[in-house]
């Protein structure tokens, strides 16, 4: 039973690592990370538009990276310039739920 639990934990890390690697290739994304297992942060430059649709697109990237059924991740897009200045300005958000 312990081997199964360890394999599940490794698989969870694998799909998250794969998703981060894939999202990091996006030209618009300055930085991407899982701040917690259920929270993905992507930093982008604010062009004045809402990035909720882009956050929804990133949900599809999570699916294609192997996000298992039953997982939920809150994707938040932050303004990269504001973040450097010590301010957290959210410019997009999507609740990604794989049922």
Image: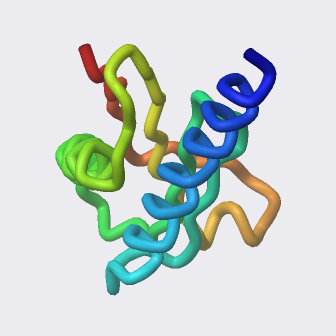
Q: Residue at x 45, y 68 (%)?
A: 44
Of the pair 4 and 99, the residue shown nearer to us: 4
Q: Residue at x 68, y 35 (%)?
A: 9
> Which colour scheme appears in the figure?
rainbow
Relative height, residue 86 to residue 70 (above, below): below
Q: Residue at x 37, y 30 (%)?
A: 68
Q: Residue at x 41, y 66 (%)?
A: 46
Give the image quarter of residue 96. top left
Give the image quarter of residue 85. bottom right
The tally of labels here is 0
Give the image quarter of residue 2. top right
Image coordinates of residue 93 in percent, x first then y, are 38, 35
Of the pair 36 and 17, the residue shown nearer to us: 17
Of the pair 68 and 33, the residue shown nearer to us: 68
Q: Split into 4 quadrants, where in the image is the N terminus? A: top right
Image coordinates of residue 40 in percent, x first then y, are 54, 44
Of the pair 38 and 79, the residue shown nearer to us: 38
Image coordinates of residue 8 in percent, x first then y, are 61, 31
Q: Split into 4 quadrants, where in the image is the C terminus? A: top left
On the rendered structure, is 35 left or right of 29? right
Image coordinates of residue 72 in percent, x first then y, are 43, 21
């Amino acid at each position: 039973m312990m081997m199964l639990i360890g394999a599940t934990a490794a698989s969870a890390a694998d799909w998250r690592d794969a998703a981060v690697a894939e999202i990091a290739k996006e030209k618009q994304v300055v930085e991407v990370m899982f701040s917690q297992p259920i929270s993905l942060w992507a930093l982008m430059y604010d062009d004045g538009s809402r990035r909720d649709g882009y956050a929804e697109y990133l949900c599809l990237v999570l699916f294609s990276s192997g996000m298992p059924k039953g997982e939920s991740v809150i994707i938040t897009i932050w303004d990269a310039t504001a973040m450097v200045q010590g301010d957290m300005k959210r410019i997009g958000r999507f609740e990604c739920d794989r049922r």
